[in-house]
Image (tube, grey):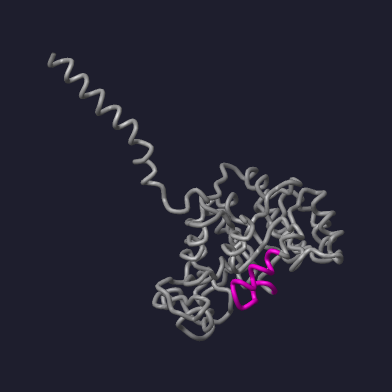
Amino acid sequence: MAAIKININLFFVISLLLVSAPFLHGCKTKEGEENYIKFKKLGDTRQYFAYKGDSSILLSGHRGGREAGYPENSIEGFQHVLNQMPAFFEVDPRLTKDSVIVLMHDATLDRTTDATGNLSDYTFSELQSVRLKDHEGNVTSAKIPTLEEVIKWSKGKTVVNLDKKDVPLHMIVELIKKHKAEKHVMLTVHTGAQARYYSDRLPGIMLSVFARTDEELADMAISGVPWECMIAYVGQTINDSNRHIVEQLRAKGVRCMVSYAPSLDRLKTAEERESAYRQAIRLSPDIIESDYPVEVWKVLKD
């Protein structure tokens, strides 16, 4: 009887562990992990961004986003967005006085930090005491991140799209190669020559190209960079003036991106922006870049 009792108790303990395992495992899931974008190989990245005709709209946080209480170009801001939705992020690399690559949209510190003056007049060490402000001008606890920190952080979570500021192209290439980050880094290029430079040194990496006009589209075409390695910024909206460009790009499998940052995002209230987003989304862009990616996401989900 004692042996039977032990076996029954053992069966009960094992059963309890099996039933509890999913819940115990779930407790370890990091916030936002269900929204992470992960790629095993570079080809997966290209497939994710390819235009397939019936693909859902992708969202990009412009400067990472400026959601309430979070600074632009900050890891804290990126994570806040990912806690609520899948997204990738356009960010702005710049050089410090001692040639450390950090994220900062403006050439000066005044608007986005509690310091003043040119970023290029500060060493990275001197920036350690500087704190970022949110969009309302409130100083936060967030520090200015280095691009290297952001590349490390973004692996297995999202894609960061590096805009072109004052960082020499070769420094960007070296950093991406150092961290083997081709799968989760995209590069914004303004000319076919820039596209060719990156494509030659980082074969297969995704590029965000400018194709707002026939001339810009032709420039990218003669660059020789494979279309499968591109998404294309076509302007603030899709309309009669650029629809033929959009159709040409989609025929090549290229997603077309519009940006609400210079227009709809500047409306003062969330209610005004929501109404404007609803109208604009009817034009069916493939990718939307916005200062308020979470607000746009909520409209898309309705």
Residue located at (67% from left, 68% from top): 275
- Depth check: give the residue in front, 18 or 302: 302
Which residue sits furthest bottom?
117
- Depth check: give the residue in front, 113 or 282: 282
Where residue 185 sits, quadrant-wise, is bottom right
- The residues colored magenta run 263-278
Question: Where does the C terminus fall, quadrant-wise?
Answer: bottom right
Q: How many marks?
A: 0
Query: In the image, is residue 231 above or below residue 134?
Result: above
Where residue 24 sits, quadrant-wise, is top left
Residue located at (68% from left, 74% from top): 262
Q: Is residue 108 magenta?
A: no
* Image coords of residue 140 (percent x, y): 42, 75
* Image coords of residue 76 (percent x, y): 46, 65
- Residue 118 falls left or right of residue 290: left
Prevalent SS, magenta region: helix
Residue located at (45% from left, 82% from top): 114
Question: Where does the N terminus fall, quadrant-wise?
Answer: top left
- Depth check: give the residue in front, 172 or 250: 250
* Image coords of residue 177 (percent x, y): 57, 53
* Image coords of residue 65 (percent x, y): 56, 67
Q: Is residue 269 magenta?
A: yes
Residue located at (48% from left, 60% from top): 79
Query: In the image, is residue 238 above or below residue 267?
Result: above
Query: In the image, is residue 116 above or below residue 56?
Result: below
